[in-house]
Image (cartoon, rainbow, N blue to C red):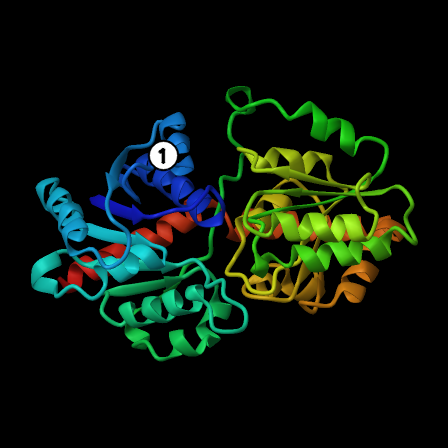
Amino acid sequence: MKIFHVIDSGGFYGAEIMLVNLVAEQMNQGLQPLIASVGDPGTQDKAIEVEARKRGLPVKVFRMRPGLNYKGTQQLLRYCHAGNFDLIHSHGYKCNILLGPLPRFIRKKPVLSTVHGWTSTTGFTKMRVYEWLDALSLRFVDGVVLVNKGMLQNSKIARLNSNKRFVVDNGIPVTPPDTSKLELLDPKIVEFCQNGFVIGSIGRYSVEKGFDILLKAFSRVLDDISSAKLILIGEGGQRSHYEAIIAEKNLTDRVMLTGYRPDAWRYLELMNVYVISSLTEGLPITLLEAMRSKVPVVSTRVGGIPDVLQDGLGGTLVQPGKSAALAQALVAQYCDPAQIDTLLEYSFERFINRYSSRKMSDSYLEIYKTLLAKK
């Protein structure tokens, strides 16, 4: 079976990590997947393209004008048809909007779309418009995959035909990649994390990740844990906002904004606790990586996270947007190490049993067979 995975990515975060893990597992199963990486004209190698090549995964680069670009869509379809791919698997709103509304007699192949999670929070923004267009396009595809069952409660998802909705939990390899082939840890980050209680998080510097709330919570944590340190691994448009908060609260010596780091999961070994402060989520890959690495988790109660952590049996949950509650949960992690051992044992077993990349790939294969049978 030949699978044409289409993605227009802006970095190498949850959706991109999920896709390369899926493609690697599909190759192990004897399938023939290809990552079709879309980008604007003049764009140099994207992070997902670099990572795919590093792992020996098949990738084809497409560059085209952004937006509703019929000519660019035709370019994708011509390649797909010429390569005799059986099915198109779209990842993210950009490609959903390109491919979803096309009549079946033009695209000829069934289209499956994975919704990794919508990121807008409040207000009228460009991203909210894109998400509205994405939800509209999903009505025309053959199948829609949600990365956790909590997304079924989203009003836009609830309007879709229930016969074409599927839930497939994200997954990662049970065994981490061969670390001998990965970059060494940044010595500056290692040095910063020594001799302290290290709180960490990984993700885009964007509004929905709630890192501004985490910074405010961390300033409260220092009142109880004088050795506390915070590292935020990622990059994005909110960096200057975070720097302003750090300066305002005199946290310069206690907080490190590391910028983007490839293979960011490797830095989990430096953390005493991993934090997800998001206002909205699907099923974050970093949560699964923390569970695999046996790092205790404090997270907001959003998206599929409560289901993964079984409402607190595998990690501590707090309401989103509440810096005081987040600070209290972090301090509790420091003060009650006995409870942490119980949480870690439960979360690791749950990861092994439910969130492996092989289990994810098996689930997708069954959906592919269902859509092709309908064809």
Q: Is residue 62 left or right of residue 280?
A: left
Q: Is residue 74 left or right of residue 142?
A: left
Q: Is residue 54 left or right of residue 256?
A: left
Give the vertical position of 41 relative to 54 (above or below): below
Residue 32 in view in this figure:
no
Give the vertical position of 184 relative to 151 (above or below): above
Tell me residue 340's x, y (percent): 79, 50
The one of 59 and 347 positioned closer to us in this rendering: 59
Give me the residue at 24% from left, 58% from top: 98
**Which quadrant is the N terminus positioned in?**
top left
Q: Amino acid at mark 1?
A: Glu
Give me the residue at 22% from left, 58% from top: 99
Query: Badge 1: few (under 14), some or many (20 or more) residues near its Cα, within 10 Å?
Result: many
Q: Residue furthest top?
A: 180
Secondary structure type for disc 1: helix
Question: Residue 329 sits in which quadrant?
Answer: bottom right
Give me the residue at 79% from left, 53% from top: 248
Tell me residue 165's x, y (percent): 34, 69
Give the vertical position of 332 relative to 152 (above or below): above
Find disc 1 in the rendering and name its residue.
49
Give the vertical position of 193 relative to 289 (above or below): above
Tell me residue 204's x, y (percent): 55, 49
